[in-house]
Structures are given as C-alpha cells and as structure tokens.
Amino acid sequence: MSQPLPPTAARRPVTSEHHGHQRVDDYEWLREKESPEVVAHLEAENAYAQARTAHLADLRGTIFDEIKARTRQTDLSVPSRLRDHWYYGRSFEGREYGASCRVPVSGPDDWTPPQPAEDASPDQPALPGEEVLLDLDELAQGHDFFSLGGSSISPDSTLLAYAIDVVGDERYTIRVKDLTTGDLLDDEIVGALGGATWDRSGSDLFYTTVDESWRADKIWRHSLGTRQADDELVFHETDGRFWVGVGRTRTDRFIMVASGSKTTSEYHVLDADAPELGLRCFAPRQEGLEYSVEHAVIAGEDRFLVMHNGSGADFELGVTPPSPTPRDAWTPLIAHDPAVRLEDVDAFAGHLVVHQRSQGLTQLRILELGEAGAHGVVDDYLVEFDEPVYTVGSGANPRFDQPTVRLGYTTMAIPSSVYDYDVRSRELSLLKRAPVLGGYDPADYEEHRVWAPSSDGASVPVSVVCRRDARASGQPLPLHLYAYGAYEMSMDPSFSIARLSLLDRGVAFAIAHVRGGGEMGRHWYDDGKLAHKQHSFDDFVAAARHLVTEGWTTHDRIVGEGASAGGLLAGAVANQAPDDFAGIVAGVPFVDPLTSMLDSSLPLTVTEYDEWGNPEADPEAYATIAAYSPYDNVAPRRYPAILAETSFHDTRVLYVEPAKWVARLREVVESPDVIMKIEMSAGHGGVSGRYQAWKDRAFTLAWVLDVLGLAPEPTSPV
C-alpha cells in the first residue's frame, strides 16, 4: 500500500536583517491563526498524522486499555486538614474530572486523617457528613476543554473562590460559591491568571491579570458584592522583565506580593495587624539578588525568614524582624553551602521545613524550634529514606499549628506515596501509596543512577529504570531518553503508570538531568542558559552515548523526548546528533526561538531575556540563538523519525513554531519521516480530562514503540 503524501506549506519568504545578518523565513505566514488557509493546513497535518499512524490503532487501543486497567478509577486523595475541615478529592470510573469534598474534623486535636471508603459510588459519600464543594464533571459539561485553576476557602470556611478555563489559553474566570447554600454569588472576575487569595477578613479577594504579552503584571483587590470594573489596582509591575504573584502566609497575617525576573526578586507585604500601613516593600530590588519571604514565629517572636542568594549562588536562609529590612540586616539561620542548594522553607508553630537538594537528590530538612537553641533552633536534621534514587517534597500542609509534615515520595519504580512525618516522635507514617492494579510489584524493576561524561568534562546524572528480567540477559535494551533542561526546573525521578507500557515490553526509560535544570545546584542552571545553552544539548547527547558505551542500549534503539523548552532540546539534538537517535518526540516545542525572542510583543518574550538573551539588542545573543535554533539549522542530511505534538490554543509556545519547523524539515530533508499532531481544543498542557490525556499519551507511546521496532503487526480486518 502506498504511503499518504504529507501536506506541503507554500513558501512565502519574509526577509529581516539584524546585526548585519539577513534572515529569510519562508513559513511565517503560518502564524495567522484566524486564517482559513492556516487552519486547513493544520487539519491536513492531523489527517496525515492519522494516516501515517493508522497501523498503530490497535496498539494505541491496547496501551490505553493498559493504562486504564492499571489505574484505580474510583479513588480519592488523602484528606488534608484546614481549620475545622478535612479536604480531599474524589475520582470516579467513567468520569474525566472528579470532585472536591470535605468533612468536619472531630475535634481541635484531631490530626489523624480519616480513611474514606475508596470504592464509594458517585452518589454515595466516602465519609459521613461529606460535602461536595465542586463537581468538576458538572462544571465541564458542554466544553471541549476544561481546567480548574486555583481554589481557595475563605478564612471562616463558608465561601469557596475557584477559577476555571474552558478554552486552554490560561485566562481564567473566578467565581465564588456560598458553601452554606450551594449558590454562586453574583461576583465574577474574568481574565484572571490562576486563582484568587482571600484577605484575612474573608471580605476581599486578591487576584492577578496579565498584559497583552501574557506577562502577569497587575494585582487587584476585589470586594465581594462589587463589580470587577470597580476593583482596586493594588500593584502594577511596569518592568517588562518582571512578573507578579500574590498569596497569604500560612499564619494568615500577611498578604505577600512577589515581583520577580529570572535573576531578581522584590516582595511587598500587607500586614493584617496594621492595614493602615498599606503595602510595603520588604527590600528593594537589587539586580541579581533573588529572595523569598515567609512569616514565622520563633522563640515567641514574629520573624520573617528570607531565602536569598546574597551570600552565595546556592542560597542562604536568613531571619529578620517582620518589617522592611535591608539586605545587610538579614541574620543567617542556615549559612550558604555550595554543596547544598536551598530551595524553599515552610514555617510552622514548632518547626521549619527546608526544601533542599544535594548531589542531584531532593531532601527535606527539619529545624525544630524552641526557646533554648541558637536563633530558636534546637535541632536540625534530614528526613531519611532507603532508596538510592528518589524524589521527596512537601504535600498539603495548610495549618500553621499542625504537628505533622505531610510529604510526597516516589521513585521511578515506587508509585507516588503520601506520608505524615510526626516532628515530635520523628515517626514516618505511610498514609497511601498510589494503587497500581493488576499485580504490580516494584521489586520487578531496578533503578540506577549513572554519570555520563559530557563534552567539556562535566558529569551528567542520568536516572534509569527497567525490568529486572529485561536487564538480566545482559543484552542492550531499547531505550526512551527524556530531558528538559531550562529555568532551573529539575526533572526528578518519578513513577508513571503509562510508562509501564514501555517497561513491560522490555524498554528501559532514562532521564538525563542536563544543565539548564537545577538538579545539581545553581551552577548547573547557569551552565545551561544564555551563552551556555549548548551545554544542555551536549549533555543530552552525552547521556545517550554513555548509555550505549555502558551496554544499556544502541543508537538505533534510542528515542529521545523533550517538551516545551525540552522540545527546543529535542529539536536541537535532531539537528546536531541525528545519528545518535532512532526517533525524537518534541512536545509543544520551542523550536523557533530566534523569531520569538526577536519579537517583544509575543507572550513571555521580554521576561525570557534573562533565560535566552535579547537577540534584538545584543549581537552575541543573536548569534548564540541562531547557532542552535532548530528551525534555522535544518540541514539536508539524514534525520531520526520525528513526532511533533502541539496545541492550537497554547499561549506559552505558539503552535506556529512546530508548524514552521515541520514545514522546513519537509522542504530541506529528503523524504523526512516526520509527522505533526495538533490538539485543536487545548493549550500548553495538552488535552483536558484524564481519559483524553491517556489516549493522547497512548498515541505517543505507540509511536515510540513503532520506531523502536516493537509495534506488533496490525490485525487484518475480517
């Protein structure tokens, strides 16, 4: 049977010149989102992708069924206590979104989460006295896309503010529900970013909006019962490199307005005990100084905890009075240590929880508070775990006076697990481990941390998981290699039910913790951005080559994958080291960075200058980006098979980037094996609804298995 012909985009050259370099862009016309011609071209790409993968229909269905069969579809989360209620989420078989619920606590000293009936039907309470706060499936009715943003309970627990997006463009509408009557208030806030934050009185909401370039730039105050047009503008960030956010401290005393760029921070605080002082700047921004502020009570005194990089790149934890305080008055509580990257701190009545990482692993550090210790700290230690490669982090811990720390724990073989850590007894109690149906046993899988030498001598950590019986033969395995590598975001090891459909077919899975991420500290990030961005790509290639050298796999049996900024990595590697990969998956990929970073009117561009550079103003930045841009460096040579996935309503990485990239691959490369799949009713995170998301992932995994030569022959019709 003959192969279907791919769509061909017309070449309509647009010429631009920057810093003496002339650039011809043949496919910029694909940016016209409202053009019927553009929509028709994208629909033709979808039709071609479906035709080219029609032989995988049975495999896609099988993988979807495997994900579904392994997932407990009627389930619930571990309840978390906030004030006088336990809050939890429920999911139901056959439903996409589920519900959020609560029940009253039994008493002020009740810190043991209740155990709801996990198999309760949708019309039955999982706990006595259950109150359904939001039925998400009901809210999603009539919409092709649905996303719940932030939701927040008022301080007196009678009102719920929640935000929904039914387009995928991350512009949310905020509504307020009266939990005593079940009715919606007349208040409606449109065009918000995420959710809303209550003031301590429960009469006002703070929320964030974005400017035309999708930069969060304004904080507003809405009084219940008034029109949005009458809302008070509380804070306006006019520097195009900075974005803003708002929240309330766990103690309920302070509203915090955070303003930050990629390299600089500034906080403003509103004290509910002294509202007449208004919003005050804690410490004015200084270029290169990053900090965050948390309210604590130490040895009976109110304090601000300041996590900052003023004493070193890997941050220090300082302590100050709860008022505006200059940098030179921040007293060290945990001094800077270049071997330990401090990331965050949570304050409670009797202890502090510090989030940190060392040697590529996440850690939770407990500082017990008392009257006698230095700066009120009487002990300082880590919560210990047995596995050599794992990820740990705080879970839902909303109460300031709680004696326990809710935490989440996972490895690539151990499903997501919820624990309570009792700070007084130092006991770790497992509350729930995400169920995997069908007889799953973590002991059937083995995990490893290997170190790959990069081209400049850096050692790149790589996390690997596979079935023990697959590895037992000693033969190279087909392998799926993933990476991200930007914004100091760490791709820490975690469990995935969908991934089992690869592992149980003998495929190994690996995460390359490349530079640009934060796995190895701030220097790891700095060495993978701006002029050093090439290190991210080199590290990914080094990981692939090391896994081949060590006998894990062979180059013709590796499929690489990256999404968003990781999609840039995937596209760059396809250009630079095509012979090292059999296939490349590029999800919502940032593959036309030069065009995007040259246009300050596009979403996020100005705020991204500190990550990628400003090629419009800086010739060196232009040259750097031009040298690695996937779109600009497509060459007439052999390429691995490529699957590009994008979404029509994505506001972070516009669909036009992969559309142009695929068009150029088809123009330059002889007989390229490239397809593009476009979700026409989704945003940056892809489709909404868990079943749709499973089908989406099944499409990708079936393609991966096909490239690896593991797809079975399709069943012939009778």
Image (cartoon, helix red, strand yellow):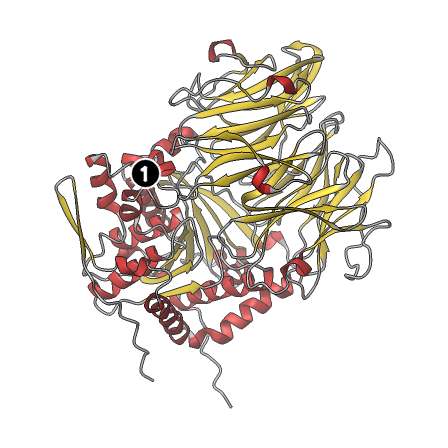
Residue 478 placement (x, y as % from top left): 41, 60
Choose between 519 and 662: the one closer to the eye: 662
> Which amino acid does the dot numbered 1 rest on?
Trp
* 254 in relation to 132, above or below: above
In this orientation, does residue 353 appear? no
Residue nearer the viewer, 71 or 219: 219
Q: Which one is nearer the viewer's eye here, 498 or 257?
A: 257
- At x 69%, y 40%, the residue is 225
The correct choice, above or below, for 506 with respect to 126 in the image is: below
Q: Secondary structure at mark 1?
A: helix
Q: Nearer the viewer, residue 568 or 689?
A: 689
Q: Assess disc 1: are there few (<14), some (14-19) or many (≥20) residues with their C-alpha within 10 Å of its C-alpha.
A: many
Query: Does residue 330 appear anywhere in the picture?
Result: yes
Figure label count: 1
Residue 205 lies in what quarter of the image? top right
Q: Is residue 495 above or below residue 323?
A: below
Q: Residue at 48% of width from left, 24% of height from top?
A: 266
- Quickly name the residue at label 1: 612
Q: Position of residue 718 (x, y in %)?
A: 51, 90
Q: Position of residue 399 (x, y in %)?
A: 72, 31
Q: Position of residue 441 (x, y in %)?
A: 64, 55
Q: Residue furthest bottom?
A: 718
Q: From the image, which quarter does the N terminus lie in?
A: bottom left
Could you say which quadrant of the image residue 354 lies in?
Answer: top right
Q: Is residue 388 left or right of residue 612?
A: right
- Left-right relation of 666 to 142: left
Q: Residue furthest left?
A: 20
